[in-house]
């Protein structure tokens, strides 16, 4: 039987429509989008059509969309492009490493950085942001949807706090784009990052929303590309693909696909909890994106469970793909108050919007058996049984 892929938060496959859209820009329309001849202008039209599609997805002006290589570059550009010596940065302890690493680098260089811990639910309290403000606070960076738990943060309330304080707000929306409607006007942010490969476009392409008037210095220099905000010859096929993926994402948000996905996620979640004792959901009770559930399994090691399910043709993850290979428990789950053992026994299921009921049913037959088998091998379980 075909494999069941439940690791969409790590990456997604290209949709056929996306492949069809980008194919001509490899073969016939291969010009440099900065060239003024016909081939170059054909490529330029593809880039600008994609820019309009991404702008529609985010509800911003076309000119506020800056194409780049993905979420990591967008997050880095937002932080390093805005922060100045003597400024204060507020972020959270549950951000992706693309935000945490730049923040720590700033702290190591002597700049003021505050890391806000979440509530046990995984939510960031706006009051905590308010309490962390200083007169020199220049930037607040908070993700919209957590990559490990799917928990959605109260960005509008945080934006109101930033606005009152005269601070800029950056939102990492990599795991939210295509899963929930994103309106940068309603959110009130100045910068927002998305990544193509999380929404059925290729790896290596993304975009950063930069609100008009935001004094963002380019981090990558060397040319006048992207209105001098990001130098480098445009990845035209990738950009075109991102634009097509944005169009398809808008369709999915309008046709009820996300509601169906949430129902399948809930069915998977409820089925696992009903069949397997000593389990629970990380982030239960908080608002989450439709495709994600993060479940802890007592007396089970995540790595062993990932391998066991892989051998049964189910692809899942213990957390962020960017932390793969690390022996440390999830920084997100630890910040939420889990102990190391439970954090190491937590598994993320992140579903593609193309998943079927039959695949959910197969998973519900396979996962409990794998968990119970591993528990039977656990020294703690053996001791309990004795």
Image (tube, rainbow, N blue to C red):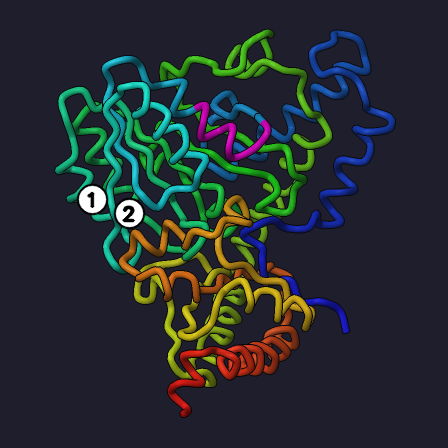
Does the magenta-highlighted stretch encompass residue 82? no
Q: The residue tagged with tag 2: helix, strand or loop?
A: loop
Category of crowding for the residue at label 1, using alpha-carbon neighbours closer than 10 angstroms: few (below 14), some (14–19), many (at least 20): some
Q: Residue at x 64, y 47 (%)?
A: 200
Viewer-nearest residue: 183 or 205:
205
Image mark for residue 154: 2
Image mark for residue 126: 1
Contact check, label 2 and label 1, Cβ < 8 Å: yes
- Residue 101 location in percent, x, y? 41, 32
Direction from residue 296 to residue 334 in the image, left or right: left
Q: Quadrant of the rendered structure where residue 381 is?
A: bottom left
Viewer-nearest residue: 359 or 301:
301
Label 2 and label 1: CA atoms lie apart by 7 Å
Viewer-nearest residue: 113 or 291:
113
Q: The residue tagged with tag 1: helix, strand or loop?
A: helix
Direction from residue 24 to residue 293 in the image, left or right: left
- Residue 361, placed above or below residue 100: below
- Residue 314, placed above or below residue 371: above
- Residue 233 location in percent, x, y? 67, 16
């Amino acid at each position: 039987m075909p494999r069941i892929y439940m690791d969409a938060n790590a990456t997604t496959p290209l949709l056929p429509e996306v492949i069809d859209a980008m194919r001509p820009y490899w073969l016939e329309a291969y010009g440099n989008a900065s060239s003024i001849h016909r081939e170059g202008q054909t490529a330029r039209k593809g880039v600008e059509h994609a820019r309009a599609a991404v702008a529609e997805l985010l509800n911003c002006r076309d000119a506020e969309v800056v194409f780049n290589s993905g979420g990591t570059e967008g997050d880095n550009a937002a932080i390093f492009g805005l922060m100045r010596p003597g400024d204060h940065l507020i972020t959270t302890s549950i951000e992706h490493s693309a935000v945490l690493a730049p923040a720590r680098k700033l702290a190591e260089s002597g700049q003021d950085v505050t890391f806000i811990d979440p509530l046990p639910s995984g939510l960031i309290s706006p009051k905590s942001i308010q309490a962390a403000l200083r007169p020199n606070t220049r930037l607040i960076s908070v993700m919209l949807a957590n990559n490990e738990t799917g928990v959605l943060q109260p960005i509008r309330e945080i934006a109101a706090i930033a606005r009152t304080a005269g601070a800029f707000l950056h939102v990492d929306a990599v795991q939210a784009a295509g899963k929930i409607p994103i309106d940068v006007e309603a959110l009130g942010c100045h910068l927002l990052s998305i990544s193509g490969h999380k929404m059925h476009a290729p790896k290596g392409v993304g975009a950063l929303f930069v609100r008009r008037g935001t004094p963002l210095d380019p981090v990558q220099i060397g040319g006048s590309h992207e209105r001098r905000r990001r130098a480098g010859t445009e990845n035209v096929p990738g950009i075109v693909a991102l634009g097509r993926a944005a169009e398809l994402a808008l369709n999915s948000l309008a046709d009820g696909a996300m509601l169906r996905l949430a129902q399948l996620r809930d069915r998977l979640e409820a089925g696992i909890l009903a069949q397997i004792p000593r389990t629970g959901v990380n982030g239960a009770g908080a608002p989450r994106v439709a495709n994600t559930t993060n479940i802890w399994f007592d007396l089970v090691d995540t790595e062993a469970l990932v391998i066991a399910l892989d051998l049964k043709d189910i692809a899942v993850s213990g957390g962020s793909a960017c932390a793969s290979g690390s022996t440390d428990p999830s920084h997100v789950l630890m910040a939420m108050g889990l102990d190391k053992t439970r954090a190491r026994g937590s598994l993320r299921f992140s579903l593609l919007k193309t998943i079927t009921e039959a695949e959910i049913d197969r998973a519900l037959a396979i996962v409990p058996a794998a968990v119970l088998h591993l528990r039977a091998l656990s020294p703690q379980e053996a001791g309990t049984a004795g």
